[in-house]
Image (cartoon, coloured by chain):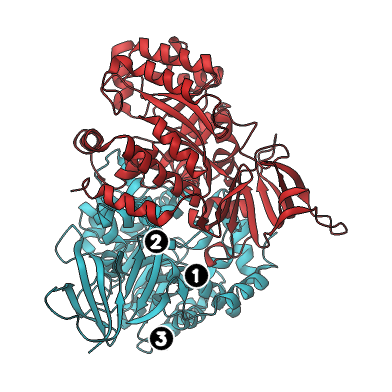
Chain colours: A red, B cyan
Amino acid sequence: MLDVLFHNALVVSPVPDSAEAGIIEDGIVGVREGRIAELGPRDPAARLPAAAETVDAKGKILMPGLVNTHTHLPMALFRGLADDLPLHTWLNEHIFPAEARHVDPESVRLGAMLACVELLLSGTTTCCDGYFLESFVAEAVADAGLRAVLGQGVIDFPAPGVPDPARNVSVAEDFLEQWSGVHARIHPSVFCHAPYTCSEKNLTSAKKAARRRGALFQIHVAETRSEVEQMRADQGLSPVAYLDRLGILDEDTLVVHGVWVDEEDIRILAETGCPVSHNPQSNMKLASGIAPVPKMVDAGICVGLGTDGCASNNDLDLFSEMDTAAKLHKVSTLDPTVLGADQVLKMATIDGAKALGLGAEVGSIEIGKRADLVVVDTDAPHLMPMYRAVSHLVYAARGADVQDVMIDGRFVVRDRRLLTVDLKDLLDRVSARCRGIGG
Amino acid sequence: MLDVLFHNALVVSPVPDSAEAGIIEDGIVGVREGRIAELGPRDPAARLPAAAETVDAKGKILMPGLVNTHTHLPMALFRGLADDLPLHTWLNEHIFPAEARHVDPESVRLGAMLACVELLLSGTTTCCDGYFLESFVAEAVADAGLRAVLGQGVIDFPAPGVPDPARNVSVAEDFLEQWSGVHARIHPSVFCHAPYTCSEKNLTSAKKAARRRGALFQIHVAETRSEVEQMRADQGLSPVAYLDRLGILDEDTLVVHGVWVDEEDIRILAETGCPVSHNPQSNMKLASGIAPVPKMVDAGICVGLGTDGCASNNDLDLFSEMDTAAKLHKVSTLDPTVLGADQVLKMATIDGAKALGLGAEVGSIEIGKRADLVVVDTDAPHLMPMYRAVSHLVYAARGADVQDVMIDGRFVVRDRRLLTVDLKDLLDRVSARCRGIGG
């Protein structure tokens, strides 16, 4: 007896050892105890498997939930606070002062909840976050029903919840201890801000703490050209080579951005097995640059997609991020064949999951995996006609086309309505809290 | 007595002689006989003006309808038919054969209607189209309730409805004659495909025909690098300089794409007053290149935004096109201050309208202008909080956030439902017709 059975679905999912997504027309997907228990084309001669709930997904795409490999969830409260500015003006005159004045446990929890809700409604079921006061992010994620890797921030300046930078690594260690193994959907992690904002000692001891727990170590690397120039001037090494010298790069270190990496950096990342989080829209909006993603993929690096925080995007819609990623690299290489739709769908699902160390659990529809599923409604003018579902998912669908979202076998969105959070109450509280922030 | 009164609205519109959008909080907009008759902040001491219908737009943005300066509407039937291919493979092995087999009056009308519906539901009220059998496009546009500049295609090969290329200009002249002054929302135009696909004689006589009628002359120019190299080899001139030599460039010639234009080309376009249609997503997906839009704008060229056809985008959502335009030029120039949100909103509204010769009638909310209005619902997690409406319209809103659309004072979309077309019947007919096209 299944808990939930989807039938009549157009099932679209990455499949192992294939560059192309697998497609099952008239597919059935059965869910039992939070995991995928049945999968295949419907046998027209046989009865449907018995299930407590049967969902007719006729005319819909059933796909794995999207995986967003880089967010700063609480910054949803700063969405659109400042745009179109030079990076240092944006950071020093707008974002940092707003954080200093307005970030506290309550705002972190509220902002994270706003972001979780946006992620769920647009089809993201797993995200990887890095911020401060991360325990309050964890509470929001747990309540919202999302799956997440959550990194407590480490930076060598006073930060929200960590007024004394000398304690930044120990606070992160406490977070790892507090959240390890206590919640099925929450994977604690350490988020070192960047090689240029954390000392060598803090980088290595934070990585050591993450290793001890088998936790993901996240770090912004080579986001801007000036950062790379500074590191070369100071250390005689690129940021990637510097982190490699410190012994920090391995399969559990997520290199975020990797915009200004050269051939040697790519070789190092490939050799160490380091995954990369690619955030095209944020890199574009902040004018950071264009990461050489096709070269990374060709070198065998696992590249996932991310939106970055709402202050630099300004939304968390991973469908639109797929579209942008596919198009940006075509024009930057002047080659329309790079990063095809199937490749980009993998980046936003299974490769993102692998980048976070969750590839065995989520990121594709396979028997035994967690039932993190999304139903996309294709009965709309902008998704008609449909010759190839993967093309539509990447180039024409948007978060607003997501109809149902299931995480761990439980519906969190149904008919575009959130089941885990009182949306009106949340938006009212966001409005009230943000009245004092702008202007 | 007004026909319709919007009140409680956050009115956002370009205003004359200002780089920044005008914002009216708690604004009222009154509509009478298809035009804007009242506009301003509400006087709290006064009664609301009398109106046959009063719309409370509390918590909504009221903005001018978007203007899409380049489409090939009937190609909506080829959405997602072929992606991620080299341009010549895409065109010669997929698009041209599909057109040869499947384009006829019925499919042109059906595809155009599908595109019109997508445009309306995503907040576009005016578009500029170029295709063949354009009279059937005009019928769809008239029925859907859209406003459009419609160009009958001229190309020196056999084309749908024009099997004999010797007749291409005369067919276009017939179209101009047939549709001039007969429909308030339809402006006939001539669409010469490109300088390399139309003879000198046909270019000049088509432009002459357009001039005689005061009609817009549209032409793809400098879309790809190879086109420019070929023209320089053949004529010793860039495509822009070549068209200038033919006397074709003026304020009523819309240069579409303008990707590979150099400083001299930009000088010519500015001097002749030629407007440009910028189609960033299509240029990215086909790997054509990145048009130097910030330089064009600095030179005083009027640049509007376009989506291009669905076969190369693959949607017609001008909100997402604004987002991409703003971000693409930041990263391509490594300057986060170029093409700010206000500038991009102008490109998608008033500058687009001016580019089409309709700047006196649409593209902004001003007394006396046509009432082409869009209500955006901001009561959604991805649009909260809201510090600056223009930022949200460009960087966070999507077509799916459009709640109501009015054209010429008449609602065509209300509460996200189309009032002019039976959507279910249309989508059924699209499905039936397209069954034979793919695969």
Disc 3: CA contacts within 10 A as few (<14), some (14-19) or many (>=20):
some
Q: Chain of mark 3?
A: B
x%, y% of residue A166? Answer: 30, 14
For badge 2, the amino acid type reads Leu
Q: Chain of mark 1?
A: B
At 67% from the left edge and 65% from the top edge, which residue is drawn?
B437
Q: Nearer the viewer, mark 3 or mark 1?
A: 1
Quadrant of the rendered structure where residue A236 is?
A: top left
Q: Nearer the viewer, mark 2 or mark 3?
A: 2
Judge if badges 3 and 1 mark residues of a common chain.
yes
Q: Chain of mark 2?
A: B
Front one among B135 and B125: B125
Marks 3 and 1, the one that precedes in the sequence: 1
Compared with A166, A395 (above or below) is: below
x%, y% of residue A107? Answer: 32, 40
SS assignment at label 3: helix
Front one among B73 and B423: B423
Q: Which residue is mark 1?
A: B115
At 27% from the left edge and 47% from the top edge, which residue is drawn?
A433
Q: Which residue is mark 3?
A: B179
Disc 1: CA contacts within 10 A as few (<14), some (14-19) or many (>=20):
many
x%, y% of residue B362? Answer: 28, 74
For badge 1, the amino acid type reads Ala
At 21% from the left edge and 39% from the top edge, which residue is drawn?
A94
In the picture, the disc for residue B318 is 2
Front one among A262 and A80: A80
x%, y% of residue A248? Answer: 46, 14
Q: Are marks 3 and 1 in contact (CB under 8 Å)?
A: no
